[in-house]
Image: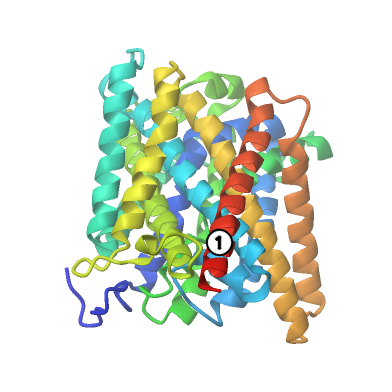
Amino acid sequence: MTSSASSRDGGLRKANLSQWETIAQSLAVIAPTGGPAMLIPLVLATSGRAAWFVFLIATIGVTCIGREINVFARRSSSPGNLYTFVHQSLRREASIVTGWALVIAYTITASAVTGGITNYCYSLFRPEAHVGVVGALVITCGAMFAAGWLAYRDIQVSTQLMLIVEACSIAAILLLFLLPGRGSALHFDKNQLLLADATAKQIRSGLVLAIFAYVGFESATSLGEEAIHPLISIPRAVSSTVWLSGLFFIISAYAQDIGYGGQIQAAVDSTAPLHLLAQMRGLPLFSPILAATTVCSFFACALACINAGARTLYMMGRDGFLPSQFGVAHKEKETPHIAVVCVCVASLLSPIVLILRNSSPLDLYGWLATFATFGFLTAYALVAVAGAMEQWKARDLDILSMASLTCVAIMLSICGWSAFDSNLDSTYKRLPYMYLTLIALGTVLTLWRRRGRERFRL
């Protein structure tokens, strides 16, 4: 597929993606199907009938983060994602931290969703079978190589596929909630709307999980060169992705509380909560449909993460923070092919190690998704600081901006505090320290390389 606006200078393809294709990039990284498929039952177990309200608060909070991102997205565009925005306002050390945080976040998110792909592939073809090492390795490697091939080949094909996949998966889940069956379909529930028996502690605990559902919503900003009218389409994509996915999560939390009734713990213990809901609602034919659409949604997430992570590496290579080979695009396909290959290979390392250690797909998903979230939160915190500085310089820091920044600070503080909770499982306790070690190593090596080159030039 070619474009009349294609660049012929060895760069990325210019002005090639429509508004909906740009939205598809952000929507796919969120993987909204993963919310009701794996995350929302946990929020229901934590927050009870206030789960829908928790997602409403999370949507408002993430919207505030998006507002700070759009401070930059409305003024400039590049493939560098939040890394470029921070680079414009803060010192280069901050931009390097942001760049590595995003690379880690996108790479490990792609790794994490292989657990979801494996889990739902088994539930589709061998629902009663134990997930074996060989089967998990085959599914993981096959999915990642397929995603890498699409990302290498053409960004437009990738985004069109992601848009179709997410639309189909969301439609299937909404039908499960709405169709009449043996269990309760979506209806007015007074107790939920009045937040019956909800406590502040339940809402706070559920909020942390709910915020995790939105990470990656900003990834459309990595399409700065490839989107049509990027200063308009990218800010729209950032804002609309939050509200589209937020509305879907709110409806899903509300509907799943009705559907599960008093059996929330059974959903938490299930390897496929949506399958359980289909059985409880007397709609068993929905099980294979939900499994197939969930697999496709997780695959689209892996593909979107490879696209976004590769473009961050691409810009870091062009800026001289990484070897120049990373900043080169394929002359014919006009994709950052070297960066795509590197992200794809890196995304395979963690799943392969965990699979060989006999970790279950759900454990793999949980550990790696949590690890990746730290990278997103780091980038969000730095871009919020950069956005505040830009608004201060432009004398545009009004009451609404101050309220938005305060909301962001509170949200990120709650997430950071929860990451070091002493009540966490031992594996989860180690993850923040592993993340800090990895990002410190990347930052130090990048600065050392950069300074070594500057001395050599002198």
Specify whether residue 91 is in view: yes
- Quadrant placement of the C terminus: bottom right
Residue 336 quadrant: bottom left
Callout 1, which amino acid? Gly
Residue 298 rendering spot, x and y as whole percentages: 38, 41
Residue 288 rendering spot, x and y as whole percentages: 29, 30
Residue 412 rendering spot, x and y as whole percentages: 73, 51
Residue 419 quadrant: top right
Residue 332 rendering spot, x and y as whole percentages: 18, 69
Outermost bottom residue: 394
Q: Is residue 329 left or right of residue 393?
A: left
Label 1 crowd bin: few (<14), some (14–19), many (20+), radius 10 Å: few
Q: Is residue 346 left or right of residue 7?
A: right
Residue name at image x 43 percent, y 25 percent: 353
Specify whether residue 190 is in view: no
Residue name at image x 72 percent, y 44 percent: 415
Q: Is residue 356 left or right of residue 337?
A: right
Residue name at image x 52 percent, y 57 percent: 217
Nearer to us in this view, 361 or 270: 361
Nearer to us in this view, 106 or 53: 106
Nearer to us in this view, 431 or 237: 431
Residue 203 in the image: above or below residue 367:
below
Report the label total: 1
Residue 7 quadrant: bottom left
Residue 132 in the image: above or below residue 76:
above
Residue name at image x 67 percent, y 22 percent: 425
Residue 339 in the image: above or below residue 136:
below
Identify the residue under disc 1: 452
Dot 1: element: helix
